[in-house]
Image (cartoon, rainbow, N blue to C red):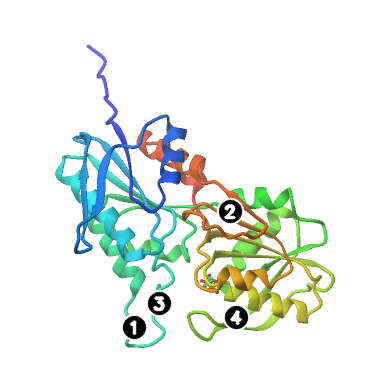
């Protein structure tokens, strides 16, 4: 009897316009080229896209972070996915290293939408699978009707921090949501941890109420899933100083959004270094910083998904 030949579907990498650099890094690691497509705006602002290469029967990956402009960036993925579906793609995976709206995962008043659920449904309606990195909360996976590979960049960040952090460091969660993250990085660096209790006053202002853990005489390393306006970091540092920490601070976060007053705020801190990943296209943040690339990690995820092998060792457990 003849052995049956199993043909792997063609791997196709597409990119939206938000972060082509990361898409190229992933493609390079995989040894493929980004697939050609047109992506432009009609005069009325509508997005027009058109695939320029054959994706029939292909395993298609669309790389695009959903940061600002969030709605446009999400829609680009949906339109590219629809184009690929109509052109006969066998499977479509959205690789969204930063998922906008993820913080809207609960309602704080009866008149609010569940933004994260709305966005999850949009993606799930157009793609077969999602790959994303360090979501605001693991529970978000439950909002998607299609499979989600929730990858973590924490080992990469911890590796970068390890070469830098002194023995006098303390890893600090600036709010309860970051407690497990701080614990994980604290264990990786073999440093103690502390927690700041935070209350959000508005989209740009937070109050840090108290510090749990001993930070006196220690150099804080504040870790979070993202830096957006920088309010959380600044408030946390003020609370730590009041408890006698050393007057220098290191910041580490997967997503460096740096919107609005973020850079100006962080410049006011005695900042030793900021560690972020390139989950969104890095802004020129002109601070002492280190950007940890996600290209190799995400290429590894794509390689495993394409080959049908397990990605579980790369997934977040927080
Ligand atoms: C909130 O729960 C998040 O984990 C971050 O702490 C927050 O989004 C950071 O935002 P900002 O930099 O504007 O304080």
* Residue visible at 66% across and 76% down in the picture: 236
State which quarter of the image contains the N terminus.
Answer: top left
Q: Position of residue 76 (x, y in %)?
A: 28, 55
Between marks 1 and 2, how big is the CA–CA gap? Answer: 32 Å
Q: Is residue 41 above or below residue 203?
A: above
Q: CA distance from mark 3 to mark 2?
A: 24 Å
Q: Nearer the viewer, residue 46 or 189?
A: 46
Q: CA distance from mark 3 to mark 1?
A: 9 Å
| For residue 43, side relative to residue 174 (left or right) | left
Reading the image, the residue beneath label 4 is: 198
Work out whether 104 lies above or below 185. below
**Residue highlighted by disc 2:** 154
Q: Tell me: 231 left or right of 29.
A: right
Residue depicted at 52% across the width and 56% down the height: 317
Q: Earlier in the sequence, mark 4 or mark 2?
A: 2
- Find numbered disc 3 in the image and state the secondary structure of the residue it sits on: loop
Query: How many numbered marks does the figure carry?
Result: 4
Q: Tell me if mark 4 has few (under 14), some (14-19) or many (20+) residues whose alpha carbon lies within 10 angstroms of its own.
A: many
Answer with the quarter of the image where residue 26 lies: top left
Left or right: 189, with 126 as reference point: right
State the separation of the CA atoms marked 1 and 4.
Answer: 22 Å
Could you tell me how far apart the alpha carbons at marks 3 and 4 are, in whole angstroms? Answer: 17 Å
Question: Does label 1 point to a residue whose CB lies under 8 Å from ligand 1?
Answer: no
Would you say residue 62 is visible in this rendering? yes
Quarter holding residue 143:
bottom left
Label 4 beta carbon within 8 A of ligand 1: yes
Mark 3 packing: few (<14 Cα in 10 Å), some, or many (20+)? some
The residue that mark 1 highlights is 112
Task: Determine whether the residue tagged by mark 2 lies in a helix, strand or loop.
Answer: helix
- Asked whether the residues under the numbered discs 3 and 2 touch, taking CB atoms below 8 Å apart as contact, a structural biologist would say no
């Amino acid at each position: 009897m003849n052995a049956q030949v199993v043909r792997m579907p063609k791997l196709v990498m597409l990119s939206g316009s938000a972060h082509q650099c990361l898409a190229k890094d992933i493609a390079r690691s995989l040894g493929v080229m980004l697939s050609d497509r047109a992506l432009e705006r009609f005069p009325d602002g509508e997005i027009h896209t058109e695939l320029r290469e054959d994706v029939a029967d292909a395993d298609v990956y669309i790389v695009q972070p959903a940061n600002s402009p969030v709605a446009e960036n999400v829609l680009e993925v949906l339109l590219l996915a629809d184009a690929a579906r109509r052109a006969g793609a066998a499977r479509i995976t959205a690789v969204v290293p930063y998922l906008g709206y993820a913080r809207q995962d609960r309602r704080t008043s009866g008149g609010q939408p569940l933004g994260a659920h709305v966005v999850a449904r949009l993606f799930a309606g157009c793609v077969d699978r999602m790959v994303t990195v360090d979501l605001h909360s693991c529970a978000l996976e439950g909002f998607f009707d299609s499979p989600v590979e929730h990858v973590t960049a924490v080992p990469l960040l911890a590796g970068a921090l390890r070469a830098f952090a002194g023995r006098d460091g303390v890893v600090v969660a600036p709010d309860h949501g970051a407690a497990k993250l701080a614990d994980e990085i604290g264990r990786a660096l073999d440093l103690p941890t502390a927690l700041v209790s935070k209350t959000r006053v508005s989209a740009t202002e937070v109050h840090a109420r108290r510090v749990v853990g001993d930070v006196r005489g220690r150099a804080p390393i504040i870790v979070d899933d993202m830096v957006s306006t920088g309010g959380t970091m600044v408030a946390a540092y003020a609370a730590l100083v009041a408890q006698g920490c050393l007057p220098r601070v290191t910041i580490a976060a997967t997503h460096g959004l740096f919107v609005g007053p973020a850079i100006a705020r962080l410049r006011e801190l005695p900042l030793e270094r900021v560690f972020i990943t390139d989950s969104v296209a890095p802004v020129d943040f002109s601070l002492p910083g280190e950007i940890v690339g996600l290209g190799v990690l995400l290429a590894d995820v794509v390689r495993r998904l394409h080959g049908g092998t397990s990605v579980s060792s790369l997934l977040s457990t927080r």
